[in-house]
Amino acid sequence: MKIADAIKIIDDNWVTKPKGFRVCMQRREGSEWVTDYSPGEKTAPLDSDVTTWRLAWKLAASTPLREGEPQEGDLVNLFVVDQDNNPVDYYSTGEKETFNACSI
Amino acid sequence: MQSELTAKAERIGFVLREYGAEMLQAMVILVVGLVVLQFTMRKLKVFIDKKTKDSSRANTILYIVYILLLVVIITSALITLGFDSRNVFRLIILSALAIIAALLVLRPYLPTLPFKVGNTVKVGALLGKIEATTMVNTRMKTFDGKTVFIPNSKILNDFVINYHFTPTRRIKIDIPIRHVRDILKTKQLMEAIMIEDPRVLLKPARPVVYTLNLTDGCVKMGARCWVNNTKFWLTQCDLLEKFLTRMERENIVLAGRRQAIRVFHETPLQLSGGDDNPGIETQAGPGAEAPSFSAVSDDDEM
């Protein structure tokens, strides 16, 4: 096997390189929960998972879960996804993480 | 003496009587022309800045337009003053040719600044973006918001790093770890973190981790990877944060500064050895009859 072939196998199977990151969240609109992304799906994603997780944390900290009925504009279930909408591990814990986790 | 002054006054009076109107007209043309030129250049600069983001190209265009309009104003003033228009044009063309020839011949010998407006450069200890250059100094805006005027003579005599010439830069992060047993785990972890970062490039070289050195009781690991110039700083900070947080999670002990504390006792202390006190050893203290102990504390672990 040539080195180039070996490297191709490693690149394809060992560690995948995401192309970008977005914060995925659910937002209360009227009586419904709407899935939203930041940055939006029509704009370029962020290229840093650290920055994206920080954005998710700040959004969650700005809209903490309240007791009782959810209000208009509440943000829950914030986590980071890659360009294919797959959840990304939180780099700090190495596990899936969700801020403002809430069963809907 | 008085006759000389009278003669001069008469000559001036004669010139003013004969050519006063033309001189006044020429002066008006010159002053009004220069005022209009300044106004036009300001408007043109706003227009060009909107049309192009290349400030260097915009400055060149503005400079050429400024020279052409200035020549037109001076020519108009000279012709109004009574100069033969053909001679004026000849003089202008000859001057232009002489200047161009001089520039072509002398250009290789003229000292030039090793950057253009808009480049990010490091001059001596100053790092920032070049905002403007003049014949005397260069205006740089540093990344902490300061505007620095650097004499061109200092720039020409100091080392200059221009980050504009190469599109990529190499990130270098060295992390000392405590235990040899963590080398392979650390290498794998650091390499995986670099590869999975979208900003880390595979060319000109793939990310790599080296075991650099074994000194002061620690193993120094070195991570190297390439990124685009514009993403260098943030990527380096993100990678370092990810290295440290993930190493903490994997129980890889980082090596900090070691501090030795020697405690001498008259009577021997009973210390339990083993893994809990790996650095404790017995030795004879100076001037002490009873055995003493030397303990190496690891109080500065990161």
Image (cartoon, rainbow, N blue to C red):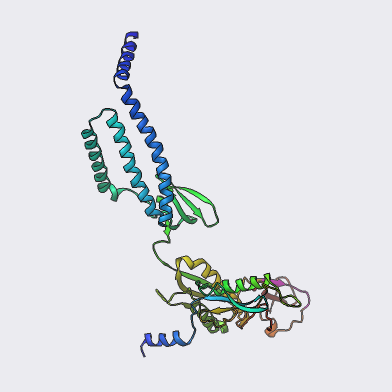
The residue located at (45%, 66%) in the rendering is: B229
Viewer-side residue, B166 vs B224: B166
Q: Quadrant of residue B87?
A: top left
Q: Can residue B220 be seen in this view?
A: no
The residue at 24%/45% (across/down) is: B101
On-image quarter of the C terminus of chain B: bottom right
Q: Tell me residue A55's x, y (percent).
A: 60, 71
Percent x, y for residue B91?
Answer: 23, 36
Instruction: Confirm whether the magenta stretch covers residue A16.
Output: no
Q: Does the image show residue B247?
A: yes
Quarter of the figure with the N terminus of chain B: top left
Give the camera-side residue of A58 and B17: B17
Q: Give the range drawn in magenta.
A: B260-267
Check the image and report above or below for B65 versus B239: above
Q: In this view, does B21 lie above or below A78?
A: above
Q: Residue lying at the far right in this picture: please name it.
A: B267
Percent from the top left, x then y, of residue B75? 29, 35
Residue at left 40%, top 47%? B44
Tell me residue B149's x, y (percent). Answer: 48, 47
Which residue is outermost to the front? A30
